[in-house]
Image (spheres, rainbow, N blue to C red):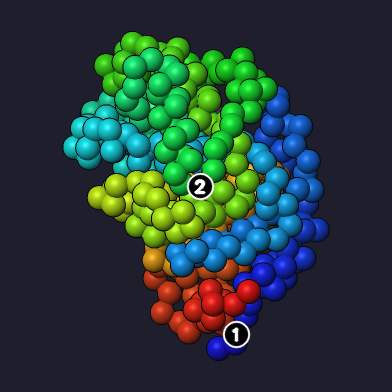
Amino acid sequence: MQAKCGTAYLNELYEKYQSLDDGVLAKYIPELALANPDSFGICVATTNGQVFQVGESQKLFTIQSIAKAFVYGIALEDHGREYVNSKVGVEPTGEGFHSIVLDEKTNRPYNPMVNTGAIATTDLIKGNGATERLKRILQVFRLYTGRDLDINVPVFLSERATSNRNRAIAYLMLNFGMINERIEETLDLYFQQSSIMVDARDLAVMTATLANGGINPITGERALDERYVKDVISVMLTCGMYNYSGEWVYRVGIPAKSGVGGGIAATVPGKLGIGTFSPLLDTRGNSIRGMKVCEDIARDFGLHIFNVVPPKYNLQEWMDGE
Ligand code: GLU
């Protein structure tokens, strides 16, 4: 097994995939189509507080669907597992992220990683009115990232202006009594959480926090009650990569969540978090360069959850390196 230093290894990945220009920018939210297709950043944060980053790892973009994983955690903290489970399932759909489908027997959305489920978990965020509920989300995200976060207002407004499909989803769930009547407030909160600006480093620290049992390894602050860490990571594993989730587990085997802003956030429990940013997406909405990077890291360091083969590189040496 060879030794490999953190940043040197990430630089190799950056060089390897920088010229890969397959994929397209998300266009269904007009503001997202303005991203620079060449942008590419990678960051790995470890549970012992090391951070390795290359490329545009500090370029801000909107978190989009990646927020869904962390908002699910807040809903669990606000209501407990049983109640949240009565409102949102944990079953992969095999359908696109904005498909309009609910479980026929229970009327529940299938899982919190698709739009139906995420609108339902957003509805569960406690707080007195829109401002307080948004503040709660931003406060928890601050615990995960270790810094104050802002909303990209043009993206928020662009999404809100083109949101008929999400509005239809919300009204369908209201019809079945799965969400509250304050539809416009909850939808705005959902669009705002999607428009939170992060960089690849933030995503790596957020997922390193999950990997570290809910405690941010850099600030030492708790972002998520330890009872719910495995719930969040489980749905990332089974449902986090849109309708590619099964194939993702097969090929990469690391719990992850992607967003149409071009981010991927992956977590290796007990070890590290990975954050990538590249806005060129495949047809399902996953960042193509980001998926390649995660696949290489998983393979080279033997991080697939079911891997039993000696890896190419030693993870501990990487974590101890520079
Ligand atoms: N803002 C997005 C929507 O609801 C989230 C999409 C995503 O990243 O999957 O359409």
Label 2 C-beta lies within 8 Å of the nearest ligand 1 atom: no
Q: Position of residue 150 (x, y in %)?
A: 59, 32
Tag 1, which secondary structure? loop
Badge count: 2
Q: Which residue is mark 1?
A: 3
Check disc 2: other Cα within 10 Å, few if <14, some if 14-19, many if 20+. many
Q: Nearer the viewer, residue 273 or 177?
A: 273
- At horizontal 51% and vertical 47% (from top left) the residue drawn is 145
Looking at numbered disc 2 in the image, what kind of residue is underneath it? Answer: Gly
* Image vertical order of residue 239 relative to residue 121, above or below: below
* Image vertical order of residue 318 relative to residue 48, above or below: below
* The N terminus, quarter of image: bottom right
- At horizontal 62% and vertical 50% (from top left) the residue drawn is 200
The quadrant in which residue 25 appears is top right
Q: Nearer the viewer, residue 316 or 287?
A: 316
Q: Is residue 155 left or right of residue 120?
A: right
Looking at numbered disc 1 in the image, what kind of residue is underneath it? Answer: Ala
Q: Which residue is mark 2?
A: 146
